[in-house]
Amino acid sequence: MRKLLLIATLLVTTLFSAQTAKQIIDKNIEITGGLTNWKLLNSILLQGKVILGVSEEYPLKIYQQRPNLTKTVITVGKKENVVEGYDGKNGYAMNYVVNKLQVQKDYVAESFDTDFIDFENKGFSAQVLGKEKVGERECFKVELIKNVNKTVYFFDVQNFFLLKEVKKDETLIYSEFKKVNGLIMPFRIEASTPKKEGDYVMILNRIDTNKAFPDNTFKF
């Protein structure tokens, strides 16, 4: 009897956590523009600068288009250089040893939408891990799990903005939120890695949505 009660309690707790996680995620989507508007977003162009280390900074452009096309361009001197991209079949990254863009065999294309949009239909489960502060802001700590992949999201308890994202090999901090054509997006992203080799700060000054890109944008 005790075992049955324990199992029932665990099941109720699991269902409650999943429901609470979904409520938090749904609130973020609603507050930042609504599910319909996010699904109507078909392309995005991010422009600004990326800061590497203490003093290195470069003009930056990031092109993204559904379902998973992407291209990252930095300007060194007066020359634009593609440093990373995905054309729908192959992933590319700059090999600085030979100073050449090369196909990456193990390149994993990221989804255009963040994983927590329609997370259940994508095969993810979600649970609330409690609350934790990001800077001075208290946040709901929500974990998304799919197979061995785990990502932890930190949503502000006051406005439900996503302030932090922790992946296996990278932590992202989001701030300076602004509205862009009805969608609220961060204009500052700070990235850090366990070995501190890929740390950067991205500061955006412009975001264009649903822009028609030239046909050769994602050809490398």
Image: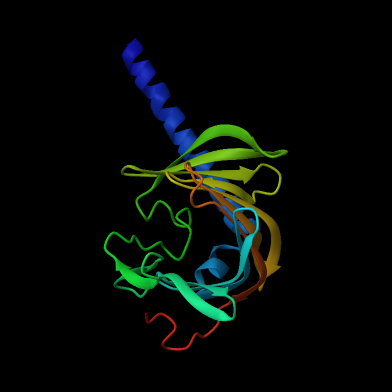
Residue 160, relative to residue 140: is it above or below?
A: below
Residue 175: x and y, percent?
67, 54
* In this rendering, position of residue 203 left or right of residue 107: right
Residue 128, relative to residue 175: is it above or below?
A: above
Residue 44, relative to residue 169: is it above or below?
A: below
Identify the residue at image location x=65%, y=58%: 55
Q: Residue furthest front?
A: 97
Residue 161: x and y, percent?
64, 51
Residue 32 visible at all: no
| Closer to the camera in the image, 41 or 167 | 167
| Closer to the camera in the image, 74 or 39 | 74
| Closer to the camera in the image, 214 or 10 | 214
What is the quadrant of residue 99 in the picture? bottom left
What is the quadrant of residue 204 in the picture? bottom right
**How many numbered marks have been drawn onto this rendered protein structure?**
0
Identify the residue at image location x=47%, y=63%: 113
Q: Quadrant of the N terminus?
A: top left
Q: Quadrant of the C terminus?
A: bottom left
Residue 31: x and y, percent?
65, 57
Residue 27: x and y, percent?
60, 51
Q: Residue furthest left?
A: 105
